[in-house]
């Protein structure tokens, strides 16, 4: 069973870039038909899909985040990263990494999840 673990700073200043890493164990991020996503949940709101990087290395982003998001990977470390630029306090949320067996843009399609990491945007 694949396991995912988020890491990164818990506090980011407004206008800076939020950077998180998801380390995967129990499976490779290059295995066929794996789609590796970032999903977030702001306080009091529902989950929001941000984007994914596929097992091929191709990426797909939500239109809501596309202009300021980059998802990349390091196959030698079996991890993938999220960079979200120009953050504001509205980007405060619990950020999750997750895996789906097919291209998925809604959180309920993901079958493996990290525990989540709280990120607060504040000066």
Image (tube, grey):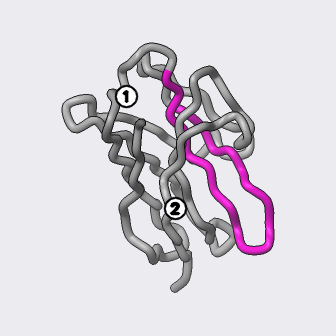
Please tell me in which quadrant of the rendered image residue 25 appears. Answer: top left
**Residue at position x 49%, y 29% from top?**
53
**Residue at position x 73%, y 55% from top?**
47
Furthest residue in direction front, as rendered = 1
Residue with the mark numbered 2: 116
Q: Main secondary structure of the magenta part?
A: strand
Instruction: Tell me, yes or no, whether the two marked residues, 1 and 2, touch with CB atoms within 8 Å.
Output: no
Residue with the mark numbered 1: 29
Residue 19: x percent and y percent? 41, 57
Q: Which residues are magenta?
A: 34-52
Say what secondary structure mark 1 lies in. Answer: loop
Compared to 93, does 52 lie above or below? Answer: above
- Say left or right for 102 vs 47: left
Front residue of 71 and 105: 105
Front residue of 77 and 18: 77
How far apart are the two marked residues, 1 and 2, measured between alpha carbons? 19 Å
Residue 24: x percent and y percent? 35, 41
**Mark 1 Cα-neighbour bin, 10 Å: few <14, some 14–19, many ≥20:** many
| Disc nearer the start of the sequence (1/2) | 1
Q: Which mark is residue 121?
A: none
Please tell me in which quadrant of the rendered image residue 90 appears. Answer: bottom right
């Amino acid at each position: 069973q694949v396991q995912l673990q988020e890491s990164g700073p818990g506090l980011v200043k407004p206008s800076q870039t939020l950077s998180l890493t998801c380390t995967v164990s129990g499976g490779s991020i290059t295995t066929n038909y794996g789609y590796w996503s970032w999903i977030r949940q702001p306080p009091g709101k529902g989950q929001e899909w941000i984007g994914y990087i596929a097992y091929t290395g191709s990426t797909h982003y939500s239109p809501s985040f596309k202009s300021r998001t980059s998802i990349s990977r390091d196959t030698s470390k079996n991890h993938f990263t999220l960079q979200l630029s120009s953050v504001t306090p509205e980007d405060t949320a619990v950020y999750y990494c997750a895996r789906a067996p097919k291209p998925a843009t809604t959180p309920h399609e993901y079958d493996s999840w990290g525990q989540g990491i709280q990120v607060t945007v504040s000066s």
